[in-house]
Image (cartoon, rainbow, N blue to C red):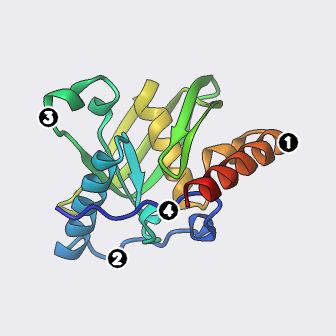
Amino acid sequence: MTVRPILTAPDPRLKAVSTDVEKVDAEIRKLAEDMADSMYAADGIGLAAVQIGVPKRIIVMDLNQEEGDQKSGKKDWRAFINPKITWTSDEMATYEEGCLSVPEIYDDVDRPARIKAEYLDLNGKRIEIEADGMLATCLQHEMDHLEGVLFIDHLSRLKRAMLLKKLTKAKKMAG
């Protein structure tokens, strides 16, 4: 088990655009395990590799964390390698989002309510899924990270500036 430190805004490495994984091998599986360990240690439900300083197109997610299963210790994470959204609904959904890279800040974000996506699993097998609700929102949130986008980038410029100022102040006080 390797818990890696999670980068927090305004760290410029979070703005990196991630590159495709060329081959799903032991090194990529180890990275995904480290990401899952880091996500659980931080009490998160999703994590992109760029958030631990590795700009590769890998996401790990465990939505059971959100539903209270973390108390039971049950871990049911999955990896999404080179994920791509292939379709989005016109209908939008609003969820209050938070992010391990933007600690203690939550705000409403509008995103497509339903999506279709494809990705590789840890065995390199191509998977296609349809998602709605929390899975659709979380996938879109984590896939934004792969493009160097944070959830606060979806907010107004004024609101984002205020939140980043609050974050920077909290970092200075903690450090």
Give me the disc on residue 7: 4
Q: CA distance from mark 3 to mark 2?
A: 31 Å
Dot 2 lies on which element? loop
Secondary structure, mark 4, is loop
The numbered mark, 4 or 2, whose residue comes first in the sequence reads: 4
Residue at horizontal 45%, vertical 24%?
A: 133
Where does label 2 land, which residue? 22
Q: Which mark is residue 119?
A: none
The type of residue carrying mark 1 is: Leu
Given contact means CB atoms under 8 Å apart, are the residues at marks 4 and 1 in contact? no
State which quarter of the image contains the C terminus. bottom right
Q: In front here: 165 or 11? A: 165
Q: Which residue is mark 3?
A: 74
Residue 150, x across and y down, in percent: 61, 51
Residue 16: % across, % down: 59, 70
| Dot 4 amino acid type | Leu
Q: Residue 152's spot in the image, x, y percent?
A: 67, 44
Name the mark nearer the viewer: 3 or 4: 4
How far apart are the two marked residues, 4 and 1, measured between alpha carbons?
23 Å
Where is mark 1, residue-wise? 158
x 78%, y 43%: residue: 162
Q: Quadrant of residue 52?
A: bottom left
